[in-house]
Image (cartoon, grey):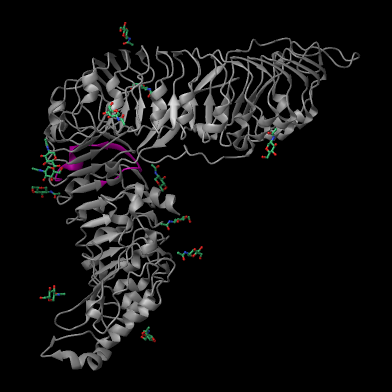
Amino acid sequence: MATDNVYIPFFLSAFIWIQLITPNVCDGALTSGCIPAERSALLEFKRGLKDPTNRLSSWVGEDCCKWEGVTCSNHTGHVIKLDLHSPHPFSDFGDEPHNNWILGENFINSTMPSWLSNISGLEHLDLNGNFLQGNIPPTFGNLASLEELNLAYNSLQGGIPTSFKNLCKLQNLILPGININQDLLELDEIFSGCIKMSLEILDLSYTNISGQLPEWLFQLRKLKSLQLSQNLISGPIPVSLGQLASLQELSLDQNQLNETIPETMGWLSQLVSMELELNFLEGVMSEAHFANLTKLKHLYLWSNSLTLKVKTDWLPPFRLESLRIGSCILGPEFPTWLQSQINISEIDMPNAGIIDAMPNWFWGLISTAEYVIISGNQISGHVPNILHLNNLSWLDLSSNYFEGPLPYFPPRLELLDLSNNSFSGIIPHDIIMNMPYLIYLSLSKNNLSGEIPFSICQLRALEALDLSKNMLSGELPNCWNNSSRIEVMDFSSNNISGVIPESICSIATLQSLHLSNNSLSGELPLSLKDCKELLLLDAGHNGLKGEIPAWIGESLTHLEFLNLRSNMLAGHIPPNLSRLSALQMLDLANNELSGTIPRSFGNFTAMTVIGRFPSLMAYAIEGSYKEQMLVTTKGNTIDYDKLLSLMNIFDLSDNNLSGGVPEELTNLSGLFSLNLSGNHFTGEITENISKLQQLESLDLSRNNFSGTIPSNLIALTSLAFLNLSYNNLSGEIPRGNQLLTFNDPSIYIGNPGLCGLPLNQSCNVSETARGQSNVDDRDENEMICSQEILRTFTFKKMLQSFKALDRVLEEFFF
Ligand SMILES: *[C@@H]1O[C@H](CO)[C@@H](O)[C@H](O)[C@H]1NC(C)=O
Ligand SMILES: *[C@@H]1O[C@H](CO)[C@@H](O)[C@H](O)[C@H]1NC(C)=O
Ligand SMILES: *[C@@H]1O[C@H](CO)[C@@H](O)[C@H](O)[C@H]1NC(C)=O
Ligand SMILES: *[C@@H]1O[C@H](CO)[C@@H](O)[C@H](O)[C@H]1NC(C)=O
Ligand SMILES: *[C@@H]1O[C@H](CO)[C@@H](O)[C@H](O)[C@H]1NC(C)=O
Ligand SMILES: *[C@@H]1O[C@H](CO)[C@@H](O)[C@H](O)[C@H]1NC(C)=O
Ligand SMILES: *[C@@H]1O[C@H](CO)[C@@H](O)[C@H](O)[C@H]1NC(C)=O
Ligand SMILES: *[C@@H]1O[C@H](CO)[C@@H](O)[C@H](O)[C@H]1NC(C)=O
Ligand SMILES: *[C@@H]1O[C@H](CO)[C@@H](O)[C@H](O)[C@H]1NC(C)=O
Ligand SMILES: *[C@@H]1O[C@H](CO)[C@@H](O)[C@H](O)[C@H]1NC(C)=O
Ligand SMILES: *[C@@H]1O[C@H](CO)[C@@H](O)[C@H](O)[C@H]1NC(C)=O
Ligand SMILES: *[C@@H]1O[C@H](CO)[C@@H](O)[C@H](O)[C@H]1NC(C)=O
């Protein structure tokens, strides 16, 4: 499929040409071979390129018309098309998974061959996706025959040359992904030239162009496709938009357009695709905006501040195939006009302000649909059995008011998200069995009860399973085997009892295991050793017993989060946990652990890194799944970043630990939170505590620490929470910097020898006590905040449908 649709004609100037090709021409028709000067021109071109994979290997021999990518005119013998677009161009990744792009096949690092402009007869030039460098050569403006110029996705920069105004035959100007970086007004001279009579496709998406939409845009007589998405265009959409009578495709998405959409939009009777998402458009859209849009198939308005206000009996002139209208207000009534959209394949309308019962006709309407996303509304009702929706692959009903038992869902589903509703009853075996292609299943935050069905183990394609926050009981299924592909499992916050099943680590792909807040008992099974890919183990708030196994440090080598908080774990902490070099959260609080803190704990590599340690979990693009974990910190002033992967937490509080705190802990300079409270630690607080320069929360309360509070504590300028109460500390409380903001004496009380502000106890006997008396009764309760991890599943369909991915993927690759 390399070279079938784009062309690059190579024409010499007429004068030179006559001399060179005469021998080959017979009665005006060429008999064989190519024109020598064009041949050497092509060879020159080849010489200037880096061609690591030898794409131009066919460029040998006399007849250049037979070379790959080269097409000659049958009449004149001239090269009329040169199609050297990358075999894996960005613009049509379509069905291909992005990891098939082989960047090495492109002409990386070569400079744009400006001399192509010497070939004045060129009609089609396609160099899409080759990472050529340099500027767009101004001499291209000499290519008077040029009909199509495609330079998309090269590493070009600089403006569109003014000489382009002379391209009087140019129909397709395709330049996305080039750093043009001009104000649209600066292009006025070019596009007011004769080019405005011929241009049909103008694609300047993702080119860093800025400014407001200028009048010249709406003077382009034949314009069929206007693509300006992913730029810095601001201001309103002008009324003159309505003049583009031939317009079929309008892509202005991902800009900074504001104000209301003009009603003249409704004049664009040829419009098939309207993409205005991700702007700052506001106001009301009414029937008038769609009046003559009889051909509209794709309507994308999501992420603006628009309200769609139409009469209840509005019959739209169009029949849509895809509707993406998330965050536009369509409600409060369920939009009845949707009922006429009988061939719709995608309905994406989350957060649309719908507060209504789901009409019955909806389940019939989506009989042709592949994607249905209506999350974040307040839609109520029961979901009927919808086995017949054969084409449905995504169904997201999350965060609504659906209730009743789980119905039968159609067999082709890949994503089913019913989270945050009020579905009740059990999870029947056969309902699960019936969805063998599920990749993502979330039933979180409902009112489901009963046991987890064994059929869950048979979902061979499943990558994410979230059954958290229900009332599920019984034991975890022990039917997993190595044909599962699950990466995330969340069973947290249910009433699940029994032991952690032996088979769970047969799942070689498992990365996150959330078991917290259940009634699990027994020990951490030896079989957990086999969870080699595990990044997160959250088994807090259960009834687990026994010791923390030493093999965790040897086997779970990728672990980033280990939360065993609030169990009944006893014994010593194994020193070799510190071999978990990626560990950034260690929460063993509220157990029955004894002994000392191992010295090796200064060796947690990830916790020694200031700033962000690269996590395997922290990638976030379209289609991501928000993984959550309860994180406990003390105090209520800590404002952690949204991403859990940014938090370094070390919490051993409320155990029976004793001895001195090893000096080595101060190596963990990436820590945000250190909590050793509620143990029997002795010794002094080290001066080196100031090395924990990112610390936001420090709790050493309820121990036997003695000596003075090191004055260095004032160096911890990020500190937002401090508790040193109930120790044996003495001397003057250091004041300065952040410590000046801690006026609550309760964080120091219970240390009879301490003096100075904010305590009432003055250090200097001659100074009268003048501390505040309003000991505010600070809430000592632990703050539990729910943190999110964004995790990505590469749904193939998602790749096809989200244009924004172009950019994201590009960022991934460079
Ligand atoms: C030239 O003629 C061949 C054979 O008839 C045909 O396949 C080809 O498409 C023609 N090329 C052009 C550019 O018209
Ligand atoms: C392209 O050039 C950059 C620096 O100019 C270099 O780092 C890179 O390796 C080059 N890539 C190729 C494929 O030659
Ligand atoms: C292109 O044409 C210019 C004159 O128009 C000439 O100076 C130059 O050498 C030509 N370059 C090539 C590579 O043919
Ligand atoms: C747009 O400009 C930014 C900042 O200068 C740059 O990083 C980015 O690569 C440019 N975009 C394109 C498509 O070149
Ligand atoms: C719209 O954007 C333009 C350009 O950024 C700005 O000058 C104008 O104030 C904005 N209008 C409104 C109503 O926000
Ligand atoms: C809308 O369509 C009607 C019927 O085809 C036509 O009469 C009318 O002129 C069109 N209006 C606009 C503004 O295109
Ligand atoms: C229905 O939609 C599909 C694409 O989803 C399209 O190919 C087909 O032509 C449409 N049928 C009608 C009758 O509009
Ligand atoms: C499902 O999609 C196929 C094509 O992918 C189409 O032929 C078929 O008609 C669709 N089924 C329904 C019920 O729309
Ligand atoms: C749950 O759904 C309700 C109602 O739509 C919404 O207000 C709330 O924010 C949702 N909660 C979560 C965690 O998504
Ligand atoms: C959950 O289900 C139980 C019965 O199983 C019922 O008593 C309770 O009201 C339900 N809660 C909600 C929030 O629907
Ligand atoms: C894994 O389990 C499935 C269903 O439970 C079963 O069909 C399959 O044979 C099992 N595979 C192995 C290797 O045990
Ligand atoms: C910490 O790591 C260093 C370097 O790997 C090693 O030399 C040292 O022995 C370790 N300390 C402890 C207490 O394990």
Q: In the rendered picture of this protein, how many numbered marks are placed on residues? A: 0
Residue 418: name its quadrant: top left
- Image vertical order of residue 336 relative to residue 678, above or below: below
- Image vertical order of residue 551 relative to residue 13, above or below: above
Q: Nearer the viewer, residue 781 or 578?
A: 578
Q: Evaluate whether residue 798 shows in this view.
A: yes
Q: Is residue 320 found left or right of 45 in the rendered image?
A: left
Quadrant location of the C terminus?
bottom left
Q: Is residue 291 magenta?
A: yes
Where residue 32 appears, x then y in whole percent?
17, 85
Where residue 15 appears, x then y in whole percent?
26, 90
Where residue 696 appears, x then y in whole percent?
63, 28
Q: Nearer the viewer, residue 656 or 767?
A: 656
Q: Evaluate whether residue 647 shows in this view.
A: no
Quadrant location of the N terminus?
bottom left
Q: Which residues are magenta?
A: 275-293
Q: Is residue 103 magenta?
A: no
Q: Nearer the viewer, residue 363 or 70?
A: 70
Q: Quadrant of ligand 7?
A: top left
Q: Is residue 784 found left or right of 268 in the rendered image?
A: right
What residue is rendered at 19% in x and 53% in y? 248
Residue 780: name its quadrant: top right
- Image vertical order of residue 584 relative to residue 235, above or below: above
Residue 335: name its quadrant: top left
